[in-house]
Amino acid sequence: MDIEMNPMNPRATKMRTSSSQSSASAVMDANTGATTFDSTPATSINKYHFSPQELEEWITKKHKTERTVVMLVGLPASGKSTIARQLSRFLQKSGYKCDIFNAGDVRRKMHQQLSTSEFFDPDNVTAKRQRDTFATMAMTDLLSNLQDEVINVGFLDATNTSIERRKSMIEMSRQAGIVDHFIILDVACDIEEYLLFNINGKAFNADYRNINHEVAIADFKKRTKHYYKAYEPLTKEEIDGFEPKVAAWVNIRNCGKATAIYNPSNCNDEIVMLIAQFADNYLEDDGKRYMEAVQAFYSKV
């Protein structure tokens, strides 16, 4: 398979250069099943012997060196963090090293005082600047872990609900020059009973430690209204305008009752196919258990 020349990805360029300087053929031994690769550079002939198992392991290891950013997009209480954790576990089963970088965790670490709903008011210019900084710090940490090969899939868990923020994050990825795939996971929820269930859970998070539960719920509802005021939904036109091209835009709505996948670069690499599979099967694999939990919650209420 041809490898696209990517000026921001020196590893891809190196692979193309190497392949242009040599030719190779593969022969399988009928008795042992081993595959022999004859590599013929200009000055020498080298032979490499792999058993079928070793060949499969080599292909897998090579593939897992690709680096992927999964940027989450979605309003508070839409289910973003939950779905990110589920997708991370799903990819780990296929051998990927994943981690989640949460802008809210950075905020709580750097912004010690309680972040009430007013901190998320889009008219609060100082707070908006701080929120953008926290997202940038999370993205910087993610890219650093990709660079150091601690992981090969990093999730940026933040709302990223503005065009400006999304453009900034993909530009950081481009400038890093190490990212092979940039995938957007767009999570949405507009069913009221699901939203109220999610908000009830949010009222127990670290933002509301030692805060009365009813007070926390009321504050989080105000926070969500602030985000709605400034929310700029993703569009196909925005996706098409990104440079470099996004490998995939994956949308999961209402715990998988509706899903959509847009592949503007026609990428069919394994990571894209796996995430598409995850989205297609989300309702059956995870969504139904969520709906059972919602039903149980309201039956108690």
Image (tube, helix red, strand yellow):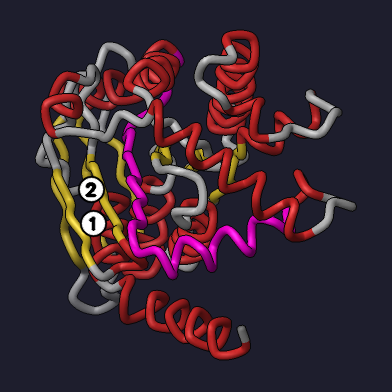
In this rendering, the count of numbered labels is: 2
Residue type marked 2:
Asp
Residue 201 included in the magenta stretch of the image: yes
Q: Is residue 109 above or below residue 96?
A: above
In the foreground, 139 or 63: 139
Of the pair 51 and 13, the residue shown nearer to us: 13
Q: Quadrant of residue 192?
A: bottom left
Callout 1 amino acid: Met
Q: Which x, y percent locates residue 76? A: 50, 46
Place of residue 164 in the rendered image (x, y in percent of width and height, measured from the top left): 37, 15
Mark 1–mark 2 distance (CA, rounded to whole Å): 6 Å
Identified at 42% across, 41% down, the residue is 72
Q: Are marks 1 and 2 in contact (CB under 8 Å)?
A: yes
Residue displayed at 38% across by 75% down: 287
The reply, left or right, for residue 44 in relation to residue 201 is: left
Quarter of the image with the N terminus in it: top left
Q: Is residue 293 left or right of residue 11?
A: right
Q: Quadrant of residue 53?
A: bottom left
Quadrant of residue 186 within the rendered picture: top left
Residue on which disc 1 sits: 273
Q: Residue at x 16, y 26 (%)?
A: 4
Q: Is residue 70 something that shows in the picture?
A: no
Q: Nearer the viewer, mark 1 or mark 2?
A: 1
Quarter of the figure that contains the C terminus: bottom right
Q: Residues within 10 Å of mark 1 (few under 14, many from 20)?
A: few
Q: Start and end of the magenta stretch?
A: 176-205
Q: Which residue is mark 2?
A: 269
